[in-house]
Amino acid sequence: DPRGLYVCETGGKRSSLQVHYRMCQNCIEVDAPTISGIVVADVVATLFLAVAVYCVTGHDRGHTSRASDRQNLIANELYQ
């Protein structure tokens, strides 16, 4: 337990230092394999989400255009 009052005496001088140390009660130690696993899982989840969004909204499924979607061009000698 490093808590307490530390005193340093050099020559005729005396200096003191009060140390307060708090232990972590609910700490979880995270090592390198755990962090790398979290990063890999995050990248895989992001790629899965990107592919899902692309599949849902990314490409046209071959819908035929309706008559209201077509542009009818009017033959006009003035613009030719």
Image (cartoon, rainbow, N blue to C red):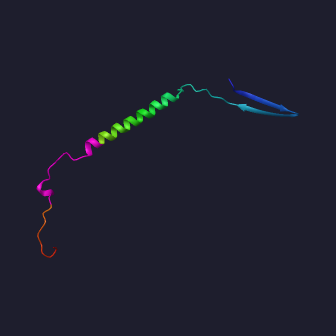
Question: Which residue shows up at 75% across the image and 33% down it?
Answer: 17
Image x and y of residue 5, in percent: 74, 28
Q: Residue furthest right?
A: 12
Question: Which residue shows up at 26% across the image and 42% down it?
Answer: 56
Is residue 40 or residue 7 the one in the foreground? 40
Identify the image quadrant of the C terminus: bottom left
Please state if 14 lies on the left or on the right of 77 as rendered. Answer: right
Does the magenta segment cover residue 68? yes
Q: Residue furthest bottom?
A: 78
Image x and y of residue 44, in percent: 38, 35
Does the magenta segment cover residue 51? no
Question: Which residue shows up at 33% across the image and 41% down it?
Answer: 50
Please state if 33 lies on the left or on the right of 3 as rendered. Answer: left
Image x and y of residue 36, in percent: 47, 31
Q: Which residues are magenta?
A: 54-70
Q: Would you place residue 57 above or below residue 77 in this image?
A: above
